[in-house]
Image (cartoon, grey):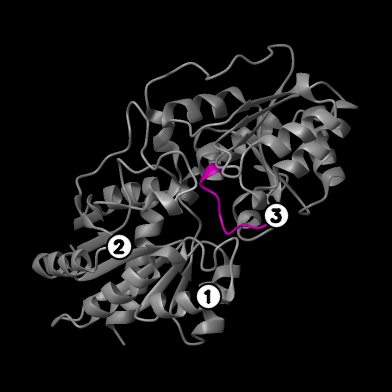
Amino acid sequence: MMRYGLIGPTYPYRGGIAHYTTLLVRELRKDNEALLISFSRQYPRLLFPGRSDRDPSQEPLTEQAEFLLDPLNPLSWGRTVGRIGQWHAEVVIIPWWVTFWAPAWSVIGRRIKRLQWEPSLVFICHNVVPHESSFIDKMAIRAALEPADGYIVHAQSDADRLRELWPGARISVTPVPTYAALGESSDVPLPVTLPEDRPVILFCGFVRPYKGLDILLDALPHVLEEQPVHLLVAGEFWNGEEQYRAQIGRLNLEEYVTIVDRYLSNEELSACISAADVVVLPYRSATQSAIVQLAFGLGKPVITTDVGGLPDVVDHGLTGLIVPPEKPEALAAAISHFFVDDLGPQFEANILAQAPRFEWRRLVDTIESLVQTVTSK
């Protein structure tokens, strides 16, 4: 049994990383002792483009946590390290996903490494470099991540970026585990009414430029030449939906697209995925995607692009289809192929067979193996 200290978001905060932290600590607590420290405040309102950072789910994922950390209050950084010390954590795990956290993580990480018993410090890097990054971001990454003994990443491309910074770093690459637990919530109706006479394509999650919704919209007229389909876009538009509404109008797609512009509860998101025939993620860039793991957890195939670690998770021709990024014609051909050749039942059976590959236990095993290499040095 190991004593873990985790620092990161959990309920009442929303989003994939909050879910990830919660599910990880839940798995760790099956065979270990784990302290979860979360935020008394996550972001100042000025820096958060979403409407709220709180999870609206009726039955949210929850685990016991202590809400001590405020990124703008250095006194809380000291309290966080003090609680880690009081707990006498043998391993401390911190998530990294955006450079806003660099000052806090830089100070907290260095103070943790100065604790008398020298706990192992592991960063789980959801994105080593932010999707929209600058030179300042890269300087912040160096400052924040340098104290770590080892790193967990979810794409080989992120491992390569870390090795550019620290050639001798201990890095383990492992896929994002399943988010099937989000689909265990009580059944709720779809947030909108969809046509019943045609298959449904789903694009979901935060709508940001790197996720390529515009590419999917450009592909849709080509799909409609082959057969009728309906596109459901479900997720909060961080930069507004006006440009996408205008694109839908230019392409005469009004009757083929439904938009739900808000953050969906776990129950609503699961309902949307369950109602879809296929989830389409035409990303321009990515490391991994929690949406893929939620789709797979609910038995739904995925069509996505050859970026980041997505091809390592979506098995082309078995659990989904992979196309080149920023190629609307290729994306349209893949969607048409999926429906014309009725690939759904075959893919769904393969997804079920591959489920053990994405269990949370495998992530914990990866962490334990990484820590063992640190402590045996």
Badge 3: few (under 14), some or many (20 or more) residues near its Cα, within 10 Å? many
Most common SS among magenta residues: loop
Left or right: where 72 falls relative to 172: left
Q: Mark 1 or 3, which is nearer the eye? A: 1
Can the viewer see residue 360 in this picture?
yes
Q: Amino acid at mark 3?
A: Arg
Report the side of 243 relative to 219 (left or right): left
Mark 1 sits on what residue?
A: 136
* C-alpha separation, residue under disc 1 versus residue under disc 3: 22 Å
Residue assigned mark 3: 284
Q: Which residues are magenta?
A: 285-291
User: Which quadrant would residue 148 be assigned to in this image?
Assistant: bottom left
Q: Name the residue located 69 percent from the left edge and 46 percent from the top edge.
A: 304
Q: Position of residue 365 (x, y in %)?
A: 36, 62
Which amino acid lies under the numbered mark 2 shown in the image of this protein?
Answer: Leu
Residue that mark 2 sits on? 72
